[in-house]
Amino acid sequence: MIALMGLSVVNIPMLTKMGIAAAGTVAIAVLIALTMIPALLGYAPDGGRQQGSAGVRRQVLVASVPRRTRANAV
């Protein structure tokens, strides 16, 4: 965005207008991305998180660890 606003330094009216318009467009796109993507992911089941092989592996590892009870405590 800063580089696009830097087009106004050359004092060519067409480049100045083009740089300001492009910088504004980038700013609007960033604001939309920051607000709309989390909102849309909230509608997705599981909050938009995919549970791939790492999630399954973590569940298997946790399930395979024996629980510590009084009978096997030292």
Image: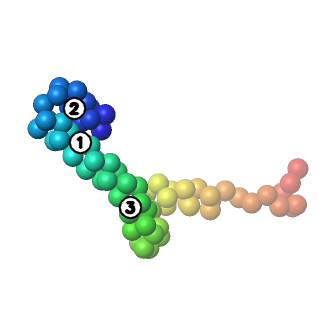
Q: Which residue position is annotated with label 2? A: 8
Q: Which residue position is annotated with label 3? A: 37
Percent across and percent down for residue 21 are 21, 46
Query: Mark 1 and 2 residues: CB-CB less than 8 Å, in contact?
Result: yes
* Residue 48 visible: no
Q: Quadrant of residue 38?
A: bottom left
User: Can you tell which mark lies on residue 20?
Assistant: 1
* Residue 47 visible: yes
Q: Residue at x 38, y 61 (%)?
A: 37
**Type of the residue with mark 1:** Ile
User: Can you tell which mark lies on residue 64?
Assistant: none
**3D distance between C-alphas at marks 1 and 3:** 25 Å
Eye-nearest disc, 1 or 3: 1
**Type of the residue with mark 2:** Ser
Within 10 Å of disc 3 (Cα), the crowding (few <14, some 14-19, many 20+) is few
**Type of the residue with mark 3:** Ile
- What is the quadrant of the N terminus in the image? top left
The answer to whether residue 9 is above or below residue 44 is above
Callout 1: helix, strand or loop? helix
**3D distance between C-alphas at marks 1 and 2:** 8 Å
